[in-house]
Amino acid sequence: MRLRSSLFGCCGLLLQLFGMVVFLRGFFPLPAKSSGAKAKASDVPAEPAGGLVSNQTQLPSPIFGRVVIMLVDALREDFVFGHKGRQFMPYTWHLVERGSSHSFIAKAWPPTVTMPRIKAMMTGKIPGFIDIIGNLNSTPLLEDNLIWQAKAAGKRIVFYGDGTWIQMFPGQFTEHDGTTPFFVPDYTEVDENVTRHLDKVLERSDWDLLILHYLGLDHIGHLAGPNSPLIGPKLSEMDNVVQKLHVGLLSKEASLPSLLILCGDHGMSDTGSHGGSSNHELNTPLVFISPAFAKKHSFVASEYVEQTDLTSTLALGFGLPIPRNNLGHLIPSVLEEPSLREQLRYVHLNGYQLSLLIQESIPAYEKDAGYKLFQIALKSHGSWIKLYLEGNTSETLANLGKKVLRQYLDAVKFMSSSLSKIVAQYDMYSMIVGTIIVVEVIFLLVVSTPEALGSTAELEVPVSSPFYSLLFYLLCLMFAAIHAVVCTSTTTSCYFCNMSWLLVATVIVLISALKCVLFSTLWRRFANRKPQHKSCAADCSSWSELDLVLLLGTFGHALSLGSSSFIEEEHQTWFFLVNTLLLVFFQDACRKYFAASDPKDKAKKWNAEDDEQQTAIHGLFETSYLDPEDDKSKDYVRSGKNYEKWLVLSSPWVILVFCRVLRSLNQTGMKYAQKPDFGHWLTSSNHRIELSVLTAISLLLIFILVQRTCSFVSKAALALGLVGIYCYRAAVGNVVFPWKPDKHDVSKGIIEARFVYVFILGILFTGVKDLLKSGVVSSDTVTNGRGLWEIYNGLVLLAALLLRPHNLPVLLFILVVQMILTKFIWRTLGYDAAQITIIYYWFGQASFYFQGNSNSIATVDISAGFVGFEDYVELPAIFLTIYATYIGPLLWAVHLTCYMSSERSRYSSAAVGHSCYCFILLRAIPASVYVILITSLRYHLFIWSVFSPKLLYEGMHTFVTGAVCVMFTAMDQKRMLKT
């Protein structure tokens, strides 16, 4: 079957995307659905008594009466224990230093976002990395947790703060008031809505557990970073809340002492974001304040604990069963006030719960060091209880008790560590199936490249031959047998084994068919050695410097993904490649204008290009084209040669300057992320005037650059939309109006954003209408090209709305560079479609990092998904967040489509197919290499902090590229049918 190279490549990319989805499903196995089993007080083991009958067969009595959990979102440990804590939180610092308190540094696990961290603290279980997806729209938590246990024990729970808790624990609170967590510009009212309840609730006695979740500090971090002048006042506000809670709890007389817990769900990076694995994102303060603790005489350095340790500690201190799936171990210093017998009882219950989990999770649990130590501690504990019940009061009893306590503590730490290591279990069968599909597709694409880039951009694909091949049926039988063996012998849950046989058979047929097609293509390529079409490579007698740079850069980047440091600093790779590319442009321009050659040939060549170059220049400045027969026009054209030459020669340097300026706009990566940059200077509250001026100028220049390809109606919509964007940013408090420089009213900007959406949809509708008209009503190529440009202009307007104001220069840079390349570089240097495609892809990747993105989840701007929406709406939020993240690559890809469509006279009919196929290869090569690399590195130290986030980015980037390539392919197929 003969297929266009664009259609063949698009099908290959979609198959690769399917393989990556299967691989991701195995690499990030979804958490198993909860069976609904919960720990019960009746299942608590009796105290080991060494053959005697113990009177402790139930849960220990609670140590604390009322408990208040004050969770401050994004509270870094140095905000409490560091210089900022001393300066802005004096009351809290006094309690930590000399009060009745115990302070710790709780270490969270990545991903450091709110929902997984709440889940970890309430269940004691380490959430899977894939739980980050649920952060935007949390679902009810079905696993055993502290909230359910407290509710089952008759505890009355009150909650104020982040609405995520209400979504995760529906129906568990006797009273609640939730706030919206994603409206970042609001860092004042969102906390006042929590604090306003405190005076009344502290006077009441109808609650046992009060949970407060403050969001303002996190919002300030996202807006201005941890060094913002807004941080100090916010910490002082939180310190006042701590004082109000502490004094209010002490003023109430109760039979049991109260407990106030100050903690953070995650920290804050040096750029103000979170989601990654830097120390500032992982380390949070954990402070227990209670009159049950002895007062300190001096400050004691805080020790490190796991965030999951809070679960078992709070459960036992509150007289509740430890949640069934808890992996943490209790913090002994918090429960050291009771008698030695009670302390042994606490660690015995924690050890018993962990030992049950060990038996369920590890087949050879008897060999586990922690389990064996727990069995030894049980026997020692029984001996101690026997002596205790017999009335022994000697020093030997005390020494033996301390020894048993140490054994228990060591046992629970070992068991907790063992369970934490097996949390990340891979579904290797699904990973292998996905890898096989990905590898088969990339080999097929690479082998077919010479024919796909041939003069006709068509290739012969042996689609039907596998079904007439004995090899195909043998492969199907072999894979079916392997599937049966794997699924009957595995002891762990496997996604593929739980699928229906129809779906499994489809995947087996797909893998077998791909293998047969690949073998057939290889046989035809290397056995016959008679390609049916002359390839592009055959047309060139030698490789140019540009070809070598593009080839080495593409494969060099793919191989660099095997290094964690190169992944963390990938932006440096793309900045280097783009800068190198610009120097090659300059070299080629110099060779064109200054290289020694036959003056007559050079004159002919220049004269042949004069008309086209002058048309470009005059088109750029929108002047009328001069009459070539007029003498004055001829003189003008001759004088314009030097002007045109210097424009071309200066273009790479102008772009190079833009690139250098944008590198200073957003520091990204890991090594220099904490360094000050121009973006943070602009977003600080002291420079709103400067940011307002920059925003206004950027929007004006964007209009000037974009309106050249707009119809009259679209120009009006574009202008009004850009004005609406400024009004939206003023409404949410990012910029100010000149006539209201001191306005501090902040709103969500819902009306302004929806006003802009109307014009975006109007421009997109105009583009789609033109495309349908050119495809159905007539075959007008002009209408088709105009429709594509209208769609591009609508996407530019949407990008301007979603980008933060300080990032608008990035959008302006994209538009300016695209204009320079199309008006001067492509027309002058005569690059072919494949070269232009690779250059576009490289600039798209560089623009991705110019936005401030990185390979860390922390740099994803989720607030873009809520522009124009009061509440979370799943599909729009996902689309807007993805688009805001990949604005750079998407705009470059769509512009490439528009350019190839509008420049049909310059390139052959195969150019669009070549461009689409090269674009697909550029995305498929690094994705395939990375799937192979991450499989081999799955036990790497940085697998969850560095490699896993990059895998998610690769998968999403492949999906986005697939969407663009579908449009590319449709355009190429339509063009072929017309031809």
Image: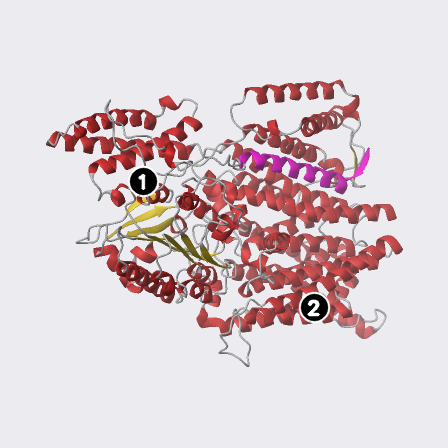
Residue in front for this viewpoint, 926 or 839: 926
Element class at badge 1: loop
The residue to which callout 2 is attached is 718
139 over 55 or under it: above or below? below
Residue at 60 percent of width and 27 percent of height: 497
Q: Name the image colouring.
A: secondary structure
Work out whether residue 698 or residue 80 is closer to the camera in this orientation and state it: 80
Residue that lies at the very extreme toward the left in this rendered image: 394
Q: Who's the residue at 73% across and 36% down the image?
A: 450
Question: Which badge, 2 or 1, is on the more N-terminal residue?
Answer: 1
Residue 969 x, y percent position in the rendering? 76, 46
Q: Which residues are magenta?
A: 1-29
Callout 2: SS = helix
Looking at the image, is mark 2 or mark 1 nearer the viewer?
1
Q: Quadrant of the N terminus?
A: top right
Q: Amino acid at mark 1?
A: Leu
Is the residue marked by circle 1 packed among few (<14), some (14-19), or many (20+) residues within 10 Å?
Answer: many
Where is 245 relative to 104, above or below? below
The percent position of residue 745, horizontal first and vertical second, equals 51, 74
Magenta includes 7? Answer: yes
Disc 2 from disc 1: Cα separation: 60 Å
From the viewer's side, name the closer residue of 620 and 510. Answer: 510
Against 41, residue 753 (above or below) is below
Does residue 263 appear in the picture of this structure?
A: yes
Q: Which residue is mark 1?
A: 330
In the rendered image, which quarter is residue 728 located in?
A: bottom right
